[in-house]
Amino acid sequence: MLSEDKDTKTYTSIGSDLLSQVGVSIPQLRAAINGRVIAPGDPEYDEARTVFSGEFDRRPAIIIRAADATDVSYVISLARQSGLELAVRIGGHSSAGHSVSEGGIVLDLRDMRALHIDTDRRTAWTETGLTAGEYTNAAAAYGLATGFGDTGSVGIGGLTLGGGVGYLVRKYGLTIDDLLAADIVTADGQVLRVNAESHPDLFWAIRGGGGNFGVATRFQFRLHEVGTVLGGLLILPATPDVIAGFIAEAEAAPEELSTIANVMPAPPMPFLPPEQHGKLVVFAMLVYAGDIEAGEGAVAPFRALATPLADMVKPMPYPQIYPPDDSSYHPTAVARNMFVNNIDREAAETIIEYLQASDAVVRVAQLRVLGGAMSRVPADATAFAHRQARIMVNLAAFYNGPEDKVLRNAWVTDFAAALHQGDSSVYVNFLGDEGERRVRDAYSGPTWKRLAEIKARYDPTNLFRLNQNIPPANGTPEQ
Ligand SMILES: Cc1cc2nc3c(=O)[nH]c(=O)nc-3n(C[C@H](O)[C@H](O)[C@H](O)COP(=O)(O)OP(=O)(O)OC[C@H]3O[C@@H](n4cnc5c(N)ncnc54)[C@H](O)[C@@H]3O)c2cc1C
């Protein structure tokens, strides 16, 4: 249950005052909006302001669950006129807390759910309020898929606009590599259709530049034939040889195979022998999107790295890669994202050393071998510039309270420094609230410059600023 304290209550009422100063009362807002308006005190307010991370207990002045692009445009002008901070929210998974505002406006797109699949053309037009799991399930009914990330409850909005790295990354590239067009409501309230021909600058920028340029209300995606895949969980004991061997095999594997290896203490899962609980394991998810027999051949070297502690890799309908969501799960965690060139035996030893030295309840080094289709797109074709990155690393530890956070943060910072291989860049979607320097690290120099210029064209006052912010080149920040 979220708590309510005096200071945030005051701030919330300042927000309501600002709304009334621009001549809008809550009843008027309700009459103007086709969707739903949720105000402090409404029964659904606490649920509606809750985001995935347990760290953010913020109280917006108003939450608007938009029904359509007209609502979105209205809310954008309301934010402009009131000067209230605007948060845009779908899945609510931003680890920087960008999907909920303290005392501002939350524009929640979760009720915008229309999805039309064109099986002949293998494309889909979807409103952006769906989660990755919802879209994936709907497309699977036709044996089709667009690749998203590793978690079904993540919204397609935030994930796509930042890039999108998932189980089809080596075979079909990033999510943005399948984005064909989008409808974007810009800071001036216009709805723009953007694609390779229409507003190509904006189309380039939204493929990696996040929510900086407007609110995406619809996406058009390419779909691929992905029916039954060979996939699932493989758990191996985590020794330096197994970790380094796993990465070497993942790099050598055919592009049909994408892997996510979590080196972590074994959770107390019923199918693992009790003596393994808490011991370091490679908890890996594998997806081979192709012929099942060929997949068995591709997975065999991983199974041969050590006697598996659990092997659940089997033919399965693609959506089963997303385990059921638990909406009551709100962890607090510190994390660091980075790219490295290799995980050899020495790096694997470092990983084991750091994980063994910590007693955080959950601690993990997640390793994702990239390459394949993702790497064949030129670095300047989209705003996601890390096309040549070989391995993405996510380090994370759960914490419990502010003191513990300091401790876990020091651990994750040291751990990242120990694994650093000269590349300071970061994937924008895995950034927390880590400051301006780190946002710049998410983009190469030329990409940053071009993004700032496009930002100045479409959002010169930086109305869309509650995000991994790219300030407009020569723009005036909005107060
Ligand atoms: C458990 C977990 C697993 C994850 N796994 C992956 C993964 O495998 N691969 C991967 O690539 N990423 C992954 N991510 C990162 C994820 O892609 C980002 O956190 C993403 O921003 C979440 O999108 P959302 O819609 O759920 O988030 P929200 O918090 O609702 O939105 C985040 C931000 O995105 C912007 N935004 C969202 N929708 C729109 C829109 N329609 N128009 C304009 N701006 C918008 C806004 O700035 C918003 O503040 C994961 C995150 C978590 C917490």
Image (cartoon, helix red, strand yellow):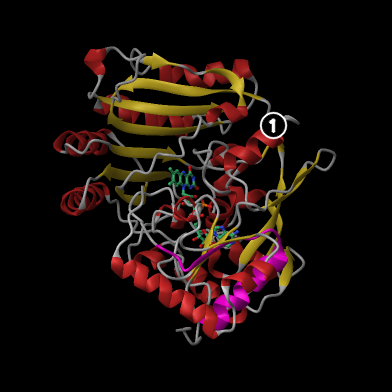
The residue furthest right is 120
* Residue drawn at 61 percent across, 70 percent down: 27
Q: Residue 18, image x and y in percent?
A: 49, 81
Q: Counting other residues with Cα less than 10 Å from the Cα at mark 1, is it few (<14), some (14-19), or many (20 or more)?
A: some
- Local SS, label 1: helix
Q: Residue 235, image x and y in percent?
A: 37, 21
Q: Residue 364, image x and y in percent?
A: 30, 37
- Residue beneath label 1, please? 140
- Front one among 143 and 350: 143
Determine whether 460 is above or below 234 in the image: below
Residue 85 painted magenta: no
Specify whether residue 366 is in view: yes
- Front one among 246 and 263: 263
* Residue drawn at 68 percent across, 30 percent down: 226
Magenta residues, as a range?
A: 59-83
Q: Residue 251, image x and y in percent?
A: 45, 34
In this rendering, position of residue 275 left or right of residue 322 = left
| Viewport quadrant of the C terminus | bottom left
In this rendering, position of residue 420 left or right of residue 425 = left
In this rendering, position of residue 469 left or right of residue 321 = left
In this rendering, position of residue 362 left or right of residue 310 = left
